[in-house]
Amino acid sequence: MTDMAVYQDDPLGDLRRLQAEMFRSVRFVVDAGLHDKRWSRGRAIDYMLSKTGMTEAEVIREIERYVVWPGQATAYKLGQFALLKLRGEAESQLGEDFDLRKFHEMVLMNGAMPLEILEESVRLWIQQQLEAV
């Protein structure tokens, strides 16, 4: 995350972070393209090759995985979007009392769960934080 200054003195590390973000976004597009838009395997390969710095062999391995695991990349990205939205809600409502470490602990403490349950958990946690102030 750029807001944690993790890459402040590491421009190459930040470049790798940006490449990873691009890769995950491309995976999202390819997953939807293959399974919703009915892209051919070749079109998915061409798209990923044009958007990443990956070799053709790497891209083919990735595409083969998406073909047999529909929705995995989409679920990952939608989960990321949901977590960022919930974090934004917490930051907005808690203001200066928002603690990123406590937020992360709350999100992780109950393990994997459906997003609707996570949303309820985060909103309950926000209320508890507001009452504790």
Image (cartoon, rainbow, N blue to C red):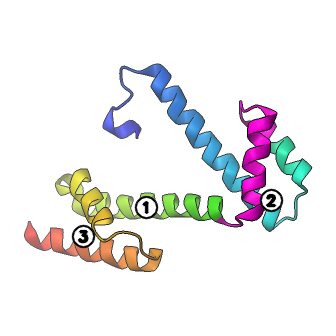
**Residue 77 image point, x, y percent:** 57, 58
Say which residue appears at 37% left-offset and 58% top-offset: 88
The amino acid on which the numbered mark 1 sits, given as a three-letter code, is Leu
- Left or right? Give the position of 70 relative to 46: left
Question: Would you call the spot at circle 3 few (<14 residues within 10 Å), some (14-19), or many (20 or more)?
Answer: many
User: In the rendered structure, which segment of residues is drawn in magenta?
Assistant: 48-71
**Closest to the observer: 23 or 56?**
56
- Left or right? Give the position of 54 relative to 130: right
Say which residue appears at 36% left-offset and 59% top-offset: 87
- Left or right? Give the position of 127 relative to 39: left
* Label at residue 83: 1
Figure check: 44 above or below 130: above
Quarter holding the N terminus?
top left
Quarter holding the C terminus?
bottom left
CA gap between label 1 and label 2 equals 24 Å
- Report the residue marked by disc 2: 33
Q: Earlier in the sequence, mark 1 or mark 2?
A: 2
Which SS class for mark 3?
A: helix
CA gap between label 2 and label 3 equals 37 Å
User: Mainly helix, strand or loop, the magenta region?
Assistant: helix
Residue furthest to the left: 133
* Label at residue 126: 3
Q: In the image, is residue 62 part of the stretch drawn in magenta? A: yes
